[in-house]
Image (cartoon, rainbow, N blue to C red):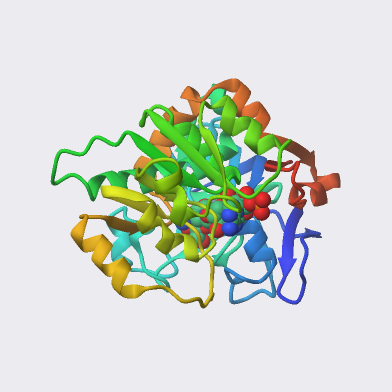
Amino acid sequence: MDAIAVYDDGDSPELIDVPRPTPAAGEALVRVLRVGVDGTDHEVIAGEHGVSPAEDDYLVLGHEAVGVVEDPNGTEFTEGELVVPMVRRPPGPDNEYFERGEADMAPTGQYHERGIVGAHGYMSEYFTSPAEYLVSIPESVAEYGFLVEPVSITEKALEHAIASRSAFEWTPESSLVLGNGSLGLLTLAMLGSRTERTYCLGRRDRPDPTIDIIESLGATYIDSRQTPVSSVSDRYEPMDLVYEATGHAPHAFETVEALAPNGVGALLGVPGTHEFEIDGGALHEELVLHNKALVGTVNSGRTHFERAVETLQSLPEWLLDDLVTDVVGVDAFERAFSDDDHTIKTAVEF
Ligand code: NAP
Ligand code: BGC
Ligand code: ZN
């Protein structure tokens, strides 16, 4: 069957032929409909993040999938049911995080991530999965079902950020998303119903499709070349919530300056090594004297996927149509990995 993979010694995705998988006991066989592409896929392709399975010199890409159960194989699913797979799998037996249903909290070495870390992804005609890692979705979500996974990432991030402020009366009014990529824009849309005023930071000139989406959502576009994150608080307003989705490491620390007293910053980017100077004392003091928090957050669990299915249904149709700039067939898969300024979110359709 067709699969889209990156070889360890390669720097771009390739169409390869791999055997169609056979479901083991407890696994269902899923026929893939669509698989989304995000910034992580680009990092994996560039060799900056992730690793191929130990037994192979290539990695089948894709962790944002939607598919249809072709063979339930004795699991609770029915043939034809629409499903979205979760990303993490246990790398071996007796894994306490997976047993507790908290795989998203497992440290490095205690998980595989399909399409990213140590396990093949979903960008192929079929995949198999234990039933416990499949989430059923309604027909109405099928077209954009590949967005359930990224929305679930933000469901988790916001849950953790809000939980960090649960010890006192906290009513966030302003929020700032750093990054106008697909994760940033989805998150901006989600924050529209949670805070009165929303802002999104990028580094693009107008006209630009991401700025159009930001403004159509009623948010304010901030150009980081004119207003660095550290000046946002003075130029606009101090932010109760900051969501970092640029992967630009200095933003993690500048977020502390952008926050209002008692605010929280959620960090999502995976930047790798990036050395620069910061005033550690000022940063430390600001966190302490103004009760600020920074929360790092990765991956997502079943409850986040389930909430994401609800959230996706509540997002306006125009947003999803404008956000998903290209859905391509396997014969044109390269287009899904383009990263020009007109590309926001893409998916490969099988
Ligand atoms: P993406 O499409 O690459 O988006 C990143 C955006 O940030 C781009 O639009 C980029 O602008 C903008 N940006 C980068 N540096 C900037 C700067 N200095 N000032 C202003 N804007 C800047 O990636 P994504 O899929 O949205 O994901 C965002 C980040 O989250 C990535 O690092 C990804 O690895 C990470 N991520 C983490 C998780 C998790 O579980 N923690 C999940 C998904 C993704 P241009 O396009 O104009 O360059
Ligand atoms: C995926 C997460 C994953 C993270 C780190 C993200 O793009 O959506 O599921 O945990 O990358 O590898
Ligand atoms: Zn992702």
Which residue shows up at 65% across the image and 31% down it?
212
Q: Position of residue 280 (x, y in %)?
A: 34, 74
Name the foreground residue: 71 vs 84. 84
- Left or right side of 273 for 304: left
Please tell me how many numbered marks the rendered image carries: 0
Residue 108, quarter of picture: bottom left
Instruction: Give how far across and how far down residue 282 sits, in percent.
Output: 31, 69
In this image, 268 relative to 340: left or right?
A: left
Where residue 277 appears, as percent x and y from the top left, is: 46, 76
Q: Nearer the viewer, residue 188 or 18?
A: 188
In screen coordinates, is 105 left or right of 319?
left
Front residue of this view, candidates 172 and 72 = 172
Q: Residue furthest front?
A: 234
Where on the picture, by quarter, is residue 208?
Answer: top right
Q: Residue 46: image x %, image y %? A: 69, 68
Instruction: Name which residue lies at 15% across and 38% down.
Output: 169
Looking at the image, residue 102 lies above or below residue 51: above
Quadrant (top left/top right/bottom left/bottom right) for the C terminus: top right
Note whether residue 191 is visible.
Answer: yes
- Give the quadrant of residue 303: top left
- Taking the view exactly as shown, the residue that stands out farthest to the right is 331
- Against 148, is 338 above or below? below
Report if residue 77 is visible in the image. Answer: no
